[in-house]
Amino acid sequence: MDLNIEAINEQLGHDPEGLTRWALNLDRRAICTTNFRPFEAVILHMATQVQPDIPVVWMDSGYNTEATYRFADEVAKRLSLNLTIYHPRRSRAHREAVDGPLPSIDDPRHAAFTEEVKLEPFARALREMDPQVWLTALRAEDTAERSQMQPVSVNAAGLIKVAPVLHWTAKDMYQYLQRHDLPNNFDYFDPTKVEDTRECGLHLQH
């Protein structure tokens, strides 16, 4: 099937629910990734409304806040998520016993840390699940790099990456949560980014 990506972005790029339906009706293997950060219940709800058993993939670095773990359990139960969790090959305790505590973002070791706890688990997830469609909750207002992205793109391997809420604001996301009585997470920390406006590299590589 040949896809006119430009036309799809023009027609559905500002219609998150319509774009989600389009992506999941392509009859291709799809996954939805999540990190259970604030507003993640939006994309998870949208996706499961169309395909209740869509595989949901979480790269759990082992460094999430207690609130994030509780939120993940609540959302997984509420939406009956078909959740697969990918962990680093070493536990947090093992890594810290050998390499010490979390390196700061200006530490030369931070790139290797990011590779270990996020990028390698995601690459492993892609190999094992072999999706043809990838739904993500990327939003343009998050970082400068994301503001340059399109809602639908295809990478060099042919993976169709779909970001239905790319053009939504935090207010749009909040209102969706309110309409559907969905929970939110206000205590989130990503050790590979540290700062909200910083990229970890995952979305720049895929």
Image: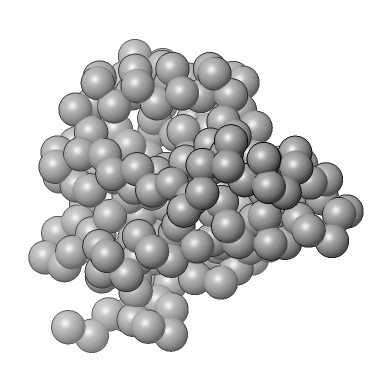
Between residues 83 and 25, which one lies in front from this camera angle? Answer: 83
Q: How is the image coloured?
A: one colour
Quadrant of the rendered structure where residue 23 is?
Answer: bottom left
Q: Residue furthest right?
A: 106
Q: Residue furthest front?
A: 98
Quarter of the figure with the N terminus: bottom left
Q: Position of residue 102 (x, y in %)?
A: 74, 41
What residue do we see at 43% from left, 78% from top? 155
Q: Position of residue 74 (x, y in %)?
A: 34, 18
Say if residue 189 shows up in the picture: yes
Quadrant of the rendered structure where residue 101 is?
Answer: top right
Q: Position of residue 22 (x, y in %)?
A: 22, 58
Relative to 154, say whether 77 is above or below: above
Compared across the picture, whether 105 is left or right of 75 comes to: right
Quadrant of the rendered structure where residue 5 is?
Answer: bottom left
Between residues 46 and 30, which one lies in front from this camera angle? Answer: 30
Q: Position of residue 28 (x, y in %)?
A: 16, 67
What residue do we see at 75% from left, 42% from top? 100
Count numbered badges in the picture. Answer: 0
Compared across the picture, whether 177 is left or right of 92 comes to: left
What residue do we see at 62% from left, 45% from top? 95
Compared across the picture, whether 85 is left or right of 167 comes to: left
Between residues 188 and 150, which one lies in front from this camera angle? Answer: 188
Between residues 80 and 119, which one lies in front from this camera angle? Answer: 119
Say if residue 177 shows up in the picture: no
What residue do we see at 18% from left, 64% from top? 29
Relative to 112, say whether 160 is above or below: below
Relative to 50, say whether 115 is above or below: below
